[in-house]
Image (cartoon, helix red, strand yellow):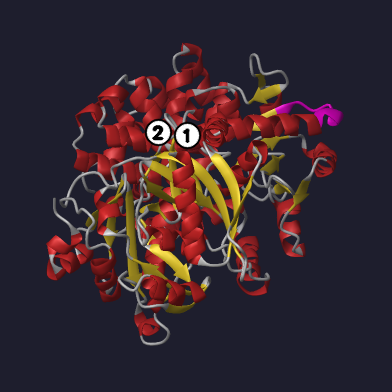
Amino acid sequence: MLTVAGLGRDELVARLRGPGLRLRTGPFVTCVKSPLALLAETLGTMYADYPVLGEGGLADFHVALSGSRGLRRLLRPQVHFHYDGMAPFQPLPLDQTFPMFEWAMNWCVSSQAHSWLVIHAAVIEKGGVAAILPAPPGSGKSTLCAALVNRGWRLLSDELTLVRLDDGNIDPLPRPVSLKNASIGILREYAPQAIFTRPVADTVKGTVAHMRASSDSVARAGDAASPAWIVFPQWRAGALAELTPVAPARAHMRLAGNAFNYSLLGAAGFEAVARLVGAVRTYDFCYGVLDDAVAVFERLLLERA
Amino acid sequence: MKEMPLLLRALRAPACMARLSEDEWDLLLRQALASNLAATLGLLAEEAGISAALPARVRRRLAWSRTVWERHLRAVAFELRQIQKALRDTGLPLILLKGAAYTAAGLPAGGGRLFSDVDILVPKERLADVESVLMLHGWAGSHHDEYDQRYYREWMHELPPMQHVRRASVIDVHHAILPETAAVRPDPARLRAGARAIPGRDGYYTLAPCDMVLHSAVHLFSEGEYHHGLRDLFDLHRLLCHFGADPGFWAALPARARELELARPLCYALRYCTRLLGTPVPAGVLDAARAGAPNPALLALMDALFLRALQPPHPSCADAFGAAARAALYIRGNWLRMPPLMLSRHLFHKAFLSPKAEPAQ
């Protein structure tokens, strides 16, 4: 199967500039067009293992990232995102090209892929069972997820948990893990072998860097997992790692609040959340040190077995 | 002009979708999404009995759009009940226009159709009552600028859009179907008198079939914005196909257009529906409607503009003159709204005096 790395740099650039790169991520094919060297370079590294389709065929999403024209190109150049000719977002400074690409890819899925309940949550798997980590920004969700996938868990997704509406299983959508501010340095130290993008300062989320998804998680993007736990993480300096059970009704409402399309799906959304909450154990999880947190997840796995 | 866009081919003859390649589907879905017709396309495939034969990825993409439409149906049903509750004290019937009417009446034109506002028609002398009961039920007026208030209240055929403070749903309260300042003003009392109760939907009304078609036509062909041009033309196509099954409808349509001074928009509606969508209109009706046509030179110009502006608003359907056609129609739309001197004053005010809208985030 052809991958981004297999294309080679020149062909990657040619496809991005020409007919579009048809990139497969999890269950989706996205046609990406861009003349920006910065995107080609970062995409070539961060998506090296991802499958690429031929030039034709059906793409689920059509995205384009382009630079500024005219004087803007010289003075504070920007990156513009277009979804098949429409511009749903304001442009960003040019050095935020890759973060914008990642956010745009998330937006494509969260706003359209309604054959899943799409939860704003990280999700990881080990031994066939998955832990869902829903959380508001700043709770340390991505940091915890990045730590776990560097200690033997498989990355299903850092941002978008795709819960199937028919059987409640989770379809993987492994893509780079987004890290912010202090987390970037912490993870570099915690996982020196992992590959990171250059940090980009002054985004709406502060300084942002992305960590590459492991080759194994990308290769196994077709292997669904069944959910076993929902864990709402909350990092607090100096806190002991501690799980507190959450009552099912409360878990349902909190999960619904974290889902992009809960109300859009109507009764199907309610049933998907109810089934999920019924099938898993739900906890609030407070932690202060990553290694302690990883140990707690290992214990969860052992208790289940 | 280039060969006919895939989306037009699919709308004309939905069964042809069964023979499309994946490459063609890629383009068709993009044209349909840009035209806000993706959910409609899925329903057409179902009606044609070819859904099951489509590639799985296509079915999945169509299902996404269908889910959005089904959610829209639930939301509209809820909003209509709330509006009806609010209007109860006024004793007025709830006369629905355009998208809300097609949807509530279960007409084929409502199939897959998304819209952002509910349009209702009330007598001009009751506007104040309607506005105050809607405010009591949570809909607040918009456009608080003094100039905009005057623009709507003195010149337009509707109140400034009213938005619900919690649900953000929007109602356009109309008292007529064209602005007070337009050259032609169809008598709204006649439209209200002809309104029909929707069977099984207690207290909901639509305009009579001919009037529904004429309103749709006057709206489309006096507009300045054509982003939904094809979607609105397809409304007309669906209305004509549906009501056209009743022979009395075709006999009445040209006469009713003359009565309401809407012969011109009817002529355009039938002309572009038949040309672009292949709508089956009886020859006699086409002849009768031709009485509303402008002089041949103007008609040739209108053809050049409308045949471009009514294409799918997707890069694959644009030709070198598309942008110019849309710009010309934008000017025309404003021109038809008010006399030239008034228009020039209005545009001057909008350009230089009105406070600028806050830029979106």
Classify residue A175 as left or right of residue B84: left
Q: Residues within 10 Å of mark 1 (few under 14, many from 20)?
A: many
Q: Quadrant of the C terminus of chain B?
A: bottom right
B207 and A97: which one is in front?
A97
The x, y position of residue A160, in whole percent, is 45, 51
Name the residue type under label 2: Ala
Question: Marks 2 and 1: in contact by CB < 8 Å?
Answer: yes
The stretch in magenta equals B87-94
Name the residue type under label 1: Thr
Q: Residue at point 42% right, 78% down?
A: A200
Q: Residue at point 51% right, 29% down?
A: B110
The x, y position of residue B75, in whole percent, is 62, 35
B336 shown above or below B93: below
A269 and B274: which one is in front?
A269
A18 shown above or below B221: below
Res B263 seen here: no
Mark 2 residue element: helix
A35 and A287: which one is in front?
A287
Mark 1 residue element: helix
Q: Which residue is mark 2?
A: B63
The x, y position of residue B25, in whole percent, is 25, 39
